[in-house]
Image (spheres, rainbow, N blue to C red):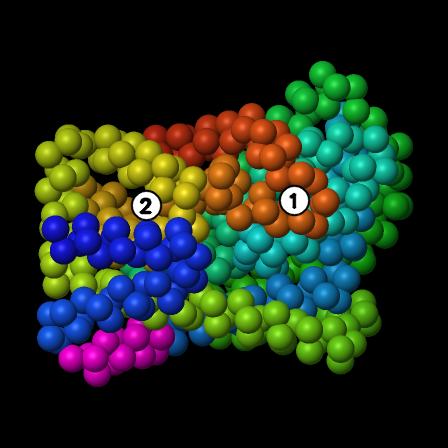
Amino acid sequence: MTLLIIGGLWLLLVLIGVPIGISMIFVSMGYFWYMERGMFIAVQRMVDGLNSFPLLAVPLFILAAAILNTAGITHHLFGFARSLVGHVRGGLGHVNVLASLFFSGMSGSALADAGGLGKMEIEAMREAGYDDDFSGAVTASSSLIGPLVPPSITMVLYGVIANVSIGQLFLGGVVPGVMCAGALMVMVYLVALRRDYPVDPRSTLSEIAARFRTSLPALLTPLVIIGGIFSGYFSPTEAAAVTVLYAIVIDLVFYRELTWRRLWDAVYETTVTSASIATIVAGVSLLSFIFAREQAPQQVARIFLSVADSPLMFLIMVNLMIFVLGCFIEALVILLVIVPILVPVAMGFGIDPVHFGIIVILNLMISIMTPPMGMALFVVSQVGNIPYQRLARAILPWLLPPIVVLILVCAFPILATGLPGLMR
């Protein structure tokens, strides 16, 4: 009953417009006051929740993505992708997906992908004669690749909460991320064939080589991160700092588009975003303490064990729950609230925590493009000047490709655990 009251009050505050992190803290403080636990304990819990060395990777990866984005590197990646697949039916749709795959190796964020590449992609597709609903849907759906391919802010948060190797998670997301890109490109081809969308002239090998040389420093970012982590030169948190330094260096040496003003804008954007995430993490730290005290994991485990009789059935139930919650609640909040509860239950079923993490993250990324509260839809609607209602209708068929990939990852754990297993 206590948990239901807390959950109900929190949802009520969110619905009336109170920021998510603030509402969590407010409700949790009420619990501490009512139970006479002492407010100093609540403050200590919030500080302890933020006092995490791996958590430092989050603002650093956000800063690296902001620097790469403001320095204009996205234009080079888009141009390289266009030279590779622009000649295929629905060319710019394929370019959209492939550019997202490239950019995901630097940003680690779906919304950074949608916001950074989205405006440029939609304008290019609009000028080429593509419908706005198609352009917006492809841009929103391709943004989910960002948190699956390393580096990934979402994976860092999952690894901190679930006490799972972030490096193993980075590797575990590679195959599902590439599979999502392939599934979306199949969808693009089928729709483009039916609508008879235009194609670009085929690029020559010299043009492709020139674009590749220009984009190579940026494309090497994920290799620097993964190589450094698994060679033992630095930890995932230190890798985030190296990524920031690498982003600055490649711009100073190769692209020379980063100015002091743009760097300041990147730092400001990072500060605002990181503060928002930190507030939510602090609120979740309080809620996690309350959940543990009220034995929420044990109660959830009993519910799942009474219904699920196999690991696959458990995963089906978890996916349905996350999918429904994702229609109404922000993905980051779902991740931070349910992972501490569900990971022990998943391990009780013998599910690899890396496998479970990739499933949860992929499902959460599907939720950011799911109406009515899909954050990627709001971002794409804004940067592309596309009415939200039109985009919300257009996105529905595009949920199918990532859902198919999610089913395959659930059914075949090797897709998520294969690469990490090779590095253990």
Q: Where's the C terminus, which quadrant?
A: bottom left
Crowdedness near tag 1: few (<14), some (14–19) or many (≥20) residues, C-alpha within 10 Å? many
Residue in view at x 50 percent, y 70 percent = 274
Residue furthest out toward the top: 194
**Vertically, is 301 above or below 182?**
below
Label placed on residue 128: none
Q: Is residue 82 magenta?
A: no
Magenta part, dominant SS? helix
Residue indicated by mark 2: 356
Label 2 sits on what residue type?
Answer: Phe
Res 407 → quadrant? top left
Of callouts 1 and 2, which one flags the residue occurring earlier in the amino acid sequence? 2
Residue furthest out toward the front: 16
Label 1 sits on what residue type?
Answer: Ser
Residue in view at x 43 percent, y 50 percent = 331
Q: Secondary structure at mark 2?
A: helix
Q: Nearer the viewer, residue 133 or 116?
A: 133
Residue 110 percent coordinates (x, y):
56, 51
Crowdedness near tag 2: few (<14), some (14–19) or many (≥20) residues, C-alpha within 10 Å? many
Residue 176 percent coordinates (x, y):
48, 40
Q: Determine whether, in the image, residue 306 is placed left or right of residue 160.
A: left
Residue 161 percent coordinates (x, y):
31, 62
Q: How many marks?
A: 2
Residue 195 percent coordinates (x, y):
75, 19
Residue indicated by mark 1: 381
Q: Determine whether, in the image, residue 122 is placed left or right of residue 295.
A: right
Q: Secondary structure at mark 1?
A: helix
Per the model, the C-alpha gap separating discs 1 and 2 is 32 Å
Q: Which residues make up the magenta segment?
A: 38-52
Residue furthest out toward the bottom: 40
